[in-house]
Image: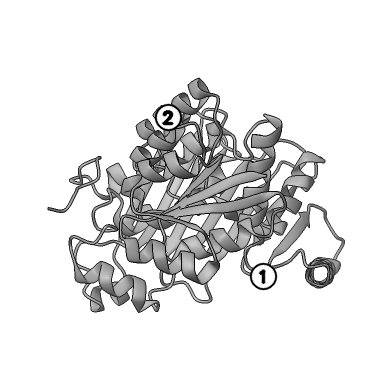
Amino acid sequence: MLRVALIGCGKIADEHVRAIRRIPDCEIVAVCDREPLMAGQIADRLGIAGRFSDAHEMLLAAAPDAVHITTPPQGHFPLAKQCLEAGSHVYIEKPFTITADDAIALVELARSRERKLTAGHNLQFTLEMLEMRRLVREGFLGGKPVHLESHFSYGLDDTSYVGPMLGSRDHWVRQLPGQLFHNILSHGIARLAEFLDDDLTEVIASAHQSDRLRQLGGQEVLDELRVLIRDRCGTTAFFCFSTQIAPGLNQLRVCGPKNSIIVDQVSGSVIRQKSGSYKSYLTYFAPPFLAAGEHLKNAGRNITNFLLQRLHQDAGIKELVEQFYDCIRTGGEPPLPYREIILTAQIMDRIFAQVYPQQDARPRLSA
């Protein structure tokens, strides 16, 4: 039985608990939050015996095999370091760390202690992403990807998050080097890191503030981002983060030398695009019919997965956590290669250095 603990008892912690409880042979033995009321409420609601307000005390008393860190990002590095040094494996919510240097340091520490680490890039493990990866492995693209596009949207209608963040310069999101971008866009960047080489020759970022955010009192916070990337192998990528696109866009396009794949994470769809030419007016008729067939196939697959209870709201996080626990039990490789975690952090560093050039690379701490 794998003994699991959580540090950080905010909203995201509930999702972790639901996912963990879908996995056999593990038990949540403790939760911890520096605000005792937060630890107490989740422990009472979800029937967790151990509750703590000090991480060191929890690690000594509960002796967890694995710890999920679900605090604001400023706490990720010091808490993960503490857990690794205590002998626990660590799952860290996104963003993994504030800087790439911190990500590298944690990976090196985990290796030296023979512990496992992973990042909360759960959208990499949804059913449609697993299907995309299967197609790539089987050679559907006809070779290595030549171009990638990742779109990620976030609405400003959730005033419970946006309101407090805009209302105070001391809000923890405003203390991050990338502000709003820093807390959200790692999901979209991680998709690209999977297929890019470590040596990036170009990262060109441009950001601005939308009229909508300006009306909400956005001050210095930017919410529209476009990024162009090229690696040393010549693979190119485009990333778009937006709060204004409607309907919301959460999509990855992987273009190969022969065929391409579109992954739509809003509808849970994988659209295969095969190259081919058609004679005369078939050019206008055949592709729409083929595209309709792809959508019908996705609808059928999603219905089947729903009936078999494979399709649920936390499918991605459950799959990631389960694979992480498996690697702990077997001593295998973590589900997210450390190379991808570090590259995601490095791309983010380079983006934030361009869009917030006056921002300190380290997190600012409020008094």
Mark positioned earlier in the residue sequence (2 or 1): 2
Q: Residue at x 34, y 38 (%)?
A: 78
The answer to whether residue 108 is above or below residue 318 is above
Residue 158 in the image: above or below residue 301: below
Give the labeled residue for mark 2.
85
Is residue 98 toward the left or the right of residue 2 in the image?
Answer: left
Task: Give the x, y percent position of residue 225.
Answer: 38, 57
Question: Which percent across, then down, holds residue 19?
Answer: 62, 59
In front: 168, or 196?
168
Report which quarter residue 164 is drawn in: bottom left
Q: Secondary structure at mark 2?
A: helix
Q: Which residue is mark 1?
A: 267
Left or right: where does residue 20 sit relative to residue 298? Answer: left
Q: Quadrant of residue 185?
A: bottom left
Is residue 356 among what the camera can see? Answer: yes
Position of 33 with respect to 289 (left or right) is left
Image point (68%, 53%), residue name: 129
SS at mark 1 in the image: loop
Amino acid at dot 2: Glu
| Mark number displayed over residue 198 | none
Of the 4 image quadrants, the one containing the N terminus is: top right
As drawn, the residue found furthest toward the top would be 112
Name which residue type carries label 1.
Answer: Ser
User: How far, Cα to Cα, is label 2 from label 1?
Assistant: 41 Å
**How many marks are shown on the rendered structure?**
2
Location of residue 87 in the rendering, given as x and y in whole percent from the top left corner? 49, 31
